[in-house]
């Protein structure tokens, strides 16, 4: 019975916090092809072709565009995937993450 009381008291003290979320943005440049940006949005961010095209046009017209909102680790991974893919394809496409 004592063990139950201790476990009950401990579980009441534990407070779960929602993780901070981070926006992953792609930045416009004058050299990366629209096709590459669209394929990046579809491949890395799992966007439909239509959504990828809309985001690509927004990036082109506004300078940057939101690809998704993720926990820190996932956002960091997505940014690294974009940078690695762009480097392999010899494009200067940049991705950044910022706290939401």
Image (tube, rainbow, N blue to C red):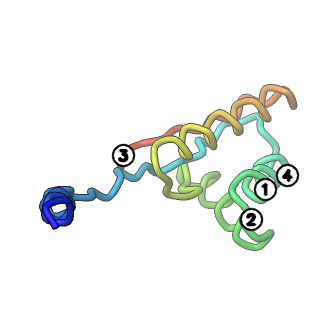
Q: Are marks 4 and 1 in contact (CB under 8 Å)?
A: yes
Name the residue rendered at 13%, 61% in the picture: 2
Q: Secondary structure at mark 2?
A: helix
Q: Position of residue 40 (x, y in %)?
A: 77, 49
* Quadrant of the frame with the N terminus: bottom left
Mark 3 surroundings: few (<14), some (14-19) or many (≥20) residues within 10 A? few
Q: Secondary structure at mark 1?
A: helix
**Residue 38, disc:** 1
Name the residue rendered at 15%, 58% in the picture: 6
Q: Are marks 2 and 4 in contact (CB under 8 Å)?
A: no
Q: Give the mark nearer the N terminus: 1 vs 3.
A: 1
Whole-number angstrom distance, CA of label 2 to CA of label 4: 9 Å
Name the residue rendered at 80%, 69% in the picture: 49
Whole-number angstrom distance, CA of label 3 to CA of label 4: 28 Å
Camera-nearest label, 1 or 3: 3
Residue farthest toward the front in the current orientation of the protein: 1
The residue beneath circle 4 is 35
Q: Give the mark nearer the N terminus: 2 vs 4.
A: 4
The residue beneath circle 2 is 53
Whole-number angstrom distance, CA of label 2 to CA of label 1: 6 Å
Whole-number angstrom distance, CA of label 3 to CA of label 2: 25 Å
Mark 4 surroundings: few (<14), some (14-19) or many (≥20) residues within 10 A? few
Mark 2 surroundings: few (<14), some (14-19) or many (≥20) residues within 10 A? some
Whole-number angstrom distance, CA of label 1 to CA of label 3: 24 Å
Q: Are marks 3 and 4 in contact (CB under 8 Å)?
A: no
Q: Are marks 2 and 1 in contact (CB under 8 Å)?
A: yes
**Residue 99, disc:** 3
């Amino acid at each position: 019975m004592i063990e139950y009381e201790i476990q009950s008291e401990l579980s009441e003290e534990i407070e779960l916090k929602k993780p901070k979320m981070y926006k992953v943005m792609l930045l416009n440049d004058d050299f990366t092809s629209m096709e590459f940006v669209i394929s990046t949005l579809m491949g890395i961010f799992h966007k439909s072709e239509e959504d990828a095209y809309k985001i690509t046009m927004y990036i082109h017209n506004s300078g940057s565009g939101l690809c998704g909102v993720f926990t820190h680790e996932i956002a960091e991974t997505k940014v690294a995937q974009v940078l690695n893919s762009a480097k392999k394809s010899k494009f200067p496409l940049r991705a950044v993450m910022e706290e939401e």
